[in-house]
Amino acid sequence: MPLYTYRCKSCDTVFETLVMGSDLPACDKCGSADLERQLGTIAAEGKSKAAMGLARAQAAREGHFSNYSRSELKRR
């Protein structure tokens, strides 16, 4: 479900909400459905291999391997 930013035309409140399919949200403050969808922030790119490597090294130092796949666990 995508996260959208809306501005209520009735009370000028700006809020973010998860929207599923063609559902139309209502204002969190006044309940109005007269909303204007705003440009939201762009999602950050996926984790790079270097960042994943650092996270996995930290997990290994802490003694938990839950973020490894089965094939990676066999190599350890």
Image: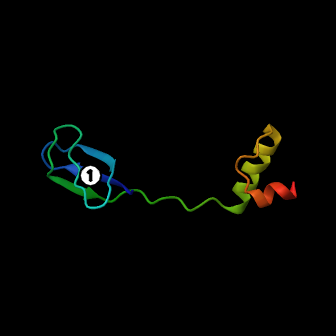
Residue 14 placement (x, y as % from top left): 27, 46
Is residue 24 or residue 27 the one in the foreground? Answer: 24
Is residue 9 or residue 59 the one in the foreground? Answer: 59
Q: Is residue 52 left or right of residue 26?
A: right
For disc 1, the marked residue is 6
Residue at the image position 77 percent from the left and 44 percent from the top: 58
Q: What kind of residue is marked 1?
A: Tyr
Residue 11 placement (x, y as % from top left): 15, 42
How many circles with numbers are drawn on the protein?
A: 1
Q: Report the quarter where the N terminus lies.
A: bottom left
Residue 42 placement (x, y as % from top left): 44, 60
Residue at the image position 86 percent from the left and 58 percent from the top: 75
Q: Is residue 72 left or right of residue 28?
A: right
Q: Residues within 10 Å of mark 1 (few under 14, many from 20)?
A: many
Q: Circle 1 sits in a helix, a strand or a loop, which is it?
A: strand
Residue at the image position 52 percent from the left and 59 percent from the top: 44
